[in-house]
Image (cartoon, rainbow, N blue to C red):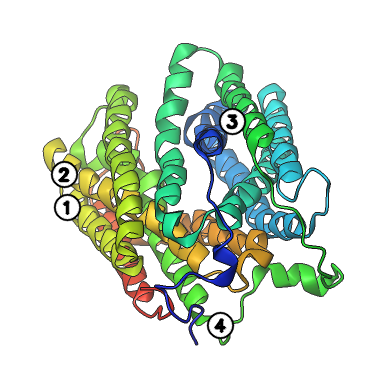
Amino acid sequence: MSTVDDPAVPPASDLSKEGLSPLTLVPYALANLCAWTMILTPMAVTMALKVREIDPSGASTSLSLVSAVGAVFGIVANPIFGRLSDRTRSRFGMRRPWLLGGVGSAGAGLVIVAVATSVPVVMLGWAIAQCGVQALFASLTAVLPDHVPVHQRGRVGGLISMGQNAATTLGSGLLALNATSLTWGLLAPVGLAVLAVVWLCLVLPDRRHDGSPRPTLSVKEVLGSYWVDPRRFPDFVWMLAGRLLVFVGITILVVYQAYFLLSRIGVPPARIAAVMFGVLLLENAVGVTTNLVSGWLSDRLRRRKVFVFWSAVVGAAGFVVAGCATEMSMFLVGVTLLGIGKGIYGAVDLALATDLLPRGERDAGKDMGLFIIAGLLPNLFAPVLASVVLAIGATGAAAPGAPAGNYSALFIAGGVFMLVGAFAVQFIRGVR
């Protein structure tokens, strides 16, 4: 069963949408960029330093526990906050209260992390931060189907995905301004996010609830936030499955890239931070460029699947090239391919998801929450999978600064997951 009868014809509810004006689009893109910077900077750098400061002897175990607890809270929170925003009848709009409440709660959680003197307090702060940022993301993502017509979603999706790609670069730049202060590293991105979200809320023509009755928010309704009937909406479910598989690969890249460089390329531990900055700069620059170009081209050609499919294939090829590398030049070729794949995928997969929403804009917050969860779930099980793959044929001693393991096999496994995710998209019938 298709979710769209004719992809060349916009749905009736789409005809009244004028899109976001430049005065709204700019703060919308900046709010996405700063929100991702606020949460990815701790995930990539400052959280590890904070945990090591508190618990130097057990930092690895404590960091894994903090990260896992935060991921669980984030996964649980997003669809619930999305569903609540779908039901909000505030005179300030449906999304605006959750945008402000989300960034405020996330900031409060990171303040707790910054002042914490024990691992349990860090865990508490990180759980609050994850809940807050997921409330923020649920409403930010819902703005796309709320206001943007189908023929513009690729371009706007490219701007949104650009923020996720550029976030680590912006976060690294903020850290460099005051590299000796962990508090600065945790809270400077919060300040930027608050300013950007407030600006967006001031100019956003927020959607108002249509007044139609909704089922009582019972336990059944809450649990239904995590479910889409595959028999009624197979296209949306195939999209989620493909995204989940692709993000297993992306998670492997994010988590194990530094260890690969130490183990396979032989980068000295003293230089790994500088080398990683250069690698991320290349990866993100390529990703941002392809974000914008692919989103525009997808709208122009009125095609989504072909972009999502080939972007995942290119990403898989990048994994194989990087996984076989023993010198930096070949690794950078693989990273460039991965950046291209991630950039195209991020822009067009988001547009594809909004085109396939089971109930259109009615439950956009809840259903886009499932889209976000498909990208978050690999944070829980990818490390477990990686530990198994790393043990396959592993020989020799560990390189300085990196656990022992077969990192070539791990990267090739990441490519396999991306390739399978690409083929899952081919089962979608309602969107071309």
Say if 315 sits above or below 175 in the image: below
Q: Is residue 269 left or right of residue 30?
A: left
Q: CA distance from mark 3 to mark 1?
A: 34 Å
Answer with mark 4 or mark 2, whichever residue precedes in sequence.
4
Per the image, the residue denoted by label 2 is 333
Three-letter amino acid code of the residue under disc 1: Val
Three-letter amino acid code of the residue under disc 4: Pro
Considering the image in quadrants, where does the C terminus appear? bottom left
Q: CA distance from mark 4 to mark 2?
A: 39 Å
Three-letter amino acid code of the residue under disc 2: Val
Q: Residue at x 51, y 32 (%)?
A: 41
Disc 1 + disc 2, Cβ < 8 Å: yes
The residue closer to the viewer here, 263 or 142, is 142
Q: State the mark number for residue 51.
A: 3
- Res 60 visible: yes
> Is disc 4 placed on a helix, strand or loop?
loop
Discs 4/2, front? 4
> Is disc 1 placed on a helix, strand or loop?
helix
